Image (cartoon, rainbow, N blue to C red):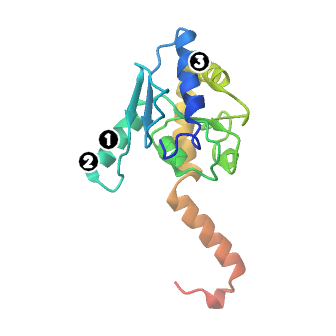
Amino acid sequence: MGVGWERKGGAITFETLLKLEEMGIAAELIICGTIPPGEFAHEKMVVIPFLDKNDERQSKEIEKLYMMSDFLLLPTRADCTPFVFNEANAFGLPVITADTGGVPDMIRNGENGYVLPYSARGSEYAQMIAEIYQDNQHYTALVQSSRAAFESRLNWDTWGRAVKDVLLKVISPAEVFV
């Protein structure tokens, strides 16, 4: 999910698919939001160039992608706080990502996914996915805790309450208009 093949770590994602296949794990990679360069093609890769969340039909397609997926793999090369993580966690979808920007503040290892070192390549991502996916109890717990992370801290209502609390601490009560 996301625009910008290189910035989102597309080559690493593709390497992950190849490594999972090499490990004997039946995997499919769905790329949504960008078109990979021509050399990145595989029979187990589906490319959806763009879906508009503001269009009801396309928004439903995005929801279906989240519901049918097992992980959101985003080895991003440059991101601050990708909202796509919140969306994935809303569907109980664990995130496997890279340590860059504000990512480690959003994704907590073992709670709602895993953050790999920025230097990690497809083999490390594939190993992480294989370990989680082949342990049904671990995967099920991670799905549940991913949804719980969304409910407790990765949603707009929680953000609004936190901002309100900060504002109330810096503004005197006489200045507050309700």
- Distance between mark 3 and mark 1 Cα atoms: 27 Å
Q: Is residue 121 left or right of residue 40?
A: right
**Circles 1 and 2 in contact, beta carbons < 8 Å:** yes
Q: Position of residue 76 (x, y in %)?
A: 61, 41
The image position of residue 169, as x and y in percent, is: 71, 76
Q: Residue at x 49, y 27 (%)?
A: 40
Give me the C-alpha separation between circle 2 and circle 3: 33 Å
Residue 53, image x, y percentages = 36, 52
Q: Mark 3 vs mark 1: which is more N-terminal?
A: 1
Q: In front here: 161 or 113?
A: 113
Front residue of this view, candidates 16 and 166 = 16
Q: Nearer the viewer, residue 146 or 30?
A: 30
Which class describes the residues within 10 Å of circle 1: few (<14), some (14-19), or many (20+)? some
Q: Badge 2 is on which residue?
A: 57
Neighbour tally class for label 2: few under 14, some 14-19, many 20 plus, Cα within 10 Å: few
CA gap, disc 1 and disc 2: 7 Å
Callout 3 environment at 10 Å: few (<14), some (14 to 19), or many (20+)?
some
Residue at the farthest front position: 38
Q: Residue 176: give its label.
A: none
| Circle 3: element type | helix
Element type where label 1 sits in the image: helix
Q: Secondary structure at mark 2?
A: helix
Provide the residue designation for mark 3.
130
Question: Looking at numbered disc 3 in the image, what kind of residue is underneath it?
Answer: Ala
Asked whether residue 135 is in view, the answer is no
The residue pinned by badge 1 equals: 61
Quadrant of residue 124 in the image? Answer: top right
Which badge, 2 or 3, comes first in the chain's sequence?
2
